[in-house]
Image (cartoon, helix red, strand yellow):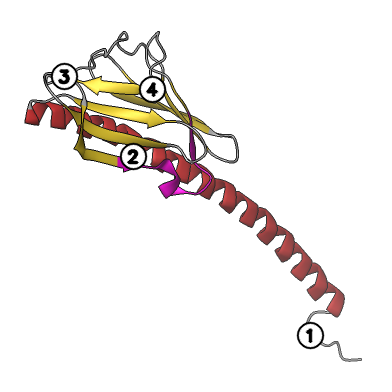
């Protein structure tokens, strides 16, 4: 009797089912990876905006401010301050949203210093100065995504930024 070479229908079904299971697991991991990657990109963008604001304050010899508005549609505004009155110069304002990196990313909180201010001010030397409240003391901006992963961007009194991640 001759033996036919090939696969039986049952073997093919088992292989297709196994490939389907592996693809489903890989797809879920890819979605989670993408969500966390977008969060990291948004946090690094906020940190780079701190550095840019600091450098502009030094190079232009005028104070700058970053004002945060937490919430689902949260945003932050980078604006030049008037050197005398320390009031924002509206014509220089640039508003950004972390949700540009993914619709699920939002600003959870923005607390700087003991007074829990929602803004950071850079003077002409690039250091953080108080505007009616003490300088930052390790608090910062917390960004979150739908997986409840978070990224915290902090700024020291010398204007140096740090980013820490808590990925779920």
Quarter occupied by the N terminus:
bottom right
Give whichever of discs 2 and 4 has the lower sequence position: 2
Give whichever of discs 2 and 1 has the lower sequence position: 1
Q: Is residue 35 above or below residue 142?
A: below
- Label 2 to label 4: alpha-carbon separation: 18 Å
Residue pointed to by mark 2? 45
Q: Is residue 51 above or below residue 103?
A: above
| Labelled pair 3, 4 in contact (Cβ < 8 Å) | no
Quarter occupied by the C terminus:
top right
Q: Is residue 119 left or right of residue 32?
A: left
Residue farthest bottom in this picture: 1
Q: Is residue 98 magenta?
A: yes
- Label 1 to label 3: alpha-carbon separation: 87 Å
- Label 3 to label 2: alpha-carbon separation: 29 Å
Q: Nearer the viewer, mark 3 or mark 2?
A: 3
The one nearer the camera, 102 or 87, is 87
Residue pointed to by mark 4? 118
Give whichever of discs 1 and 4 has the lower sequence position: 1
């Amino acid at each position: 009797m001759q033996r036919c070479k090939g696969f039986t229908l049952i073997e093919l079904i088992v292989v297709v089912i196994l490939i389907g299971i592996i693809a489903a697991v890989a797809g879920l991991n890819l979605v989670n990876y993408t969500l966390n990657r977008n969060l990291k990109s948004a946090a690094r963008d906020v940190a780079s905006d701190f550095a840019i604001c600091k450098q502009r304050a030094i190079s232009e010899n005028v104070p700058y401010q970053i004002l945060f508005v937490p919430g689902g549609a949260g945003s932050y505004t980078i604006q030049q301050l008037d050197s005398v009155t320390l009031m924002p110069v509206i014509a220089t304002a640039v508003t950004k949203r972390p949700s540009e990196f993914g619709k699920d990313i939002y600003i959870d909180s923005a607390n700087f210093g003991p007074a829990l201010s929602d803004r950071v001010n850079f003077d002409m030397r690039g250091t953080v100065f108080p505007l009616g409240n003490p300088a930052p003391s390790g608090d910062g901006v917390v960004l979150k995504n739908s997986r409840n992963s978070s990224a915290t961007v902090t700024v020291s009194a010398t204007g140096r930024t740090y980013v820490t991640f808590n990925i779920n």
